[in-house]
Amino acid sequence: MPLVTFANSNGLNEVSGSAFGKNDESGEENLRIAGTGGAGFVVPSTVEGSNVDLADEFAKLIVSQRSFSANSRLINTVDQMTQELLRLR
């Protein structure tokens, strides 16, 4: 299985999470056979390790959860104020 290497792999554009794209900074692509010329190996029947930072994801989850909670309390308060205003009429 052929693999592609670049002269400057740090110059690649991050497209999403673990996908990268070629640009002028990365240099030309070099098609190589797996395991030769600096190309990695392809190992069948293995599971790739996660590249997700769990601590960062949990922190984002907590922030989102607190924002949702604060927004729901705000909606509740506005609803109560509207009801009180209607009772005063």
Image (cartoon, rainbow, N blue to C red):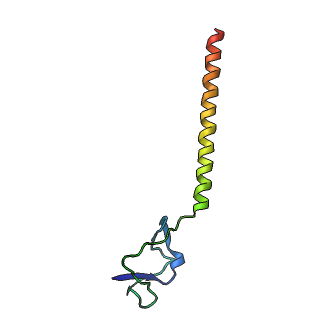
Image quadrant containing the C terminus:
top right
Question: Measuring 62% from the left and 55% from the top, which residue is drawn there?
Answer: 59
- Coordinates of residue 66 in the picture (x, y in percent): 63, 44
Q: Quadrant of residue 54?
A: bottom right
| Residue 40 at x, y percent in the picture | 44, 84
Question: Which of the two residues, 86 or 29, is positioned nearer the viewer here?
Answer: 86
Left or right of 38? Residue 58 is right
Residue 51 percent coordinates (x, y)? 52, 68
At 60% from the left and 24% from the top, the residue drawn is 79
Q: Which of the two residues, 69 or 75, is positioned nearer the viewer here?
A: 69
Q: Quadrant of residue 10?
A: bottom right
Q: Residue furthest left?
A: 1
State the image coordinates of residue 42 (x, y, percent, origin top left): 39, 81
Compared to 50, does 27 lie above or below? Answer: below
- In the rendered image, the vertical position of residue 54 relative to residue 33, given as above or below: above
- Could you tell me if residue 28 is visible in this image? no
Residue that extends furthest to the front in the rendered view of this protein: 45
| Picture mark count | 0
Residue found at x 59% / y 41%: 68
Q: Quadrant of residue 48?
A: bottom left
The residue that appears at 49% across and 64% down in the rendered structure is 17
Q: Quadrant of the N terminus?
A: bottom left
Vertically, is 43 above or below 88? below
User: Residue pushed farthest bottom?
Assistant: 37
Residue 77 higher or lower than 85, as above or below: below
Asked whether residue 1 appears in the rendered view, the answer is: yes
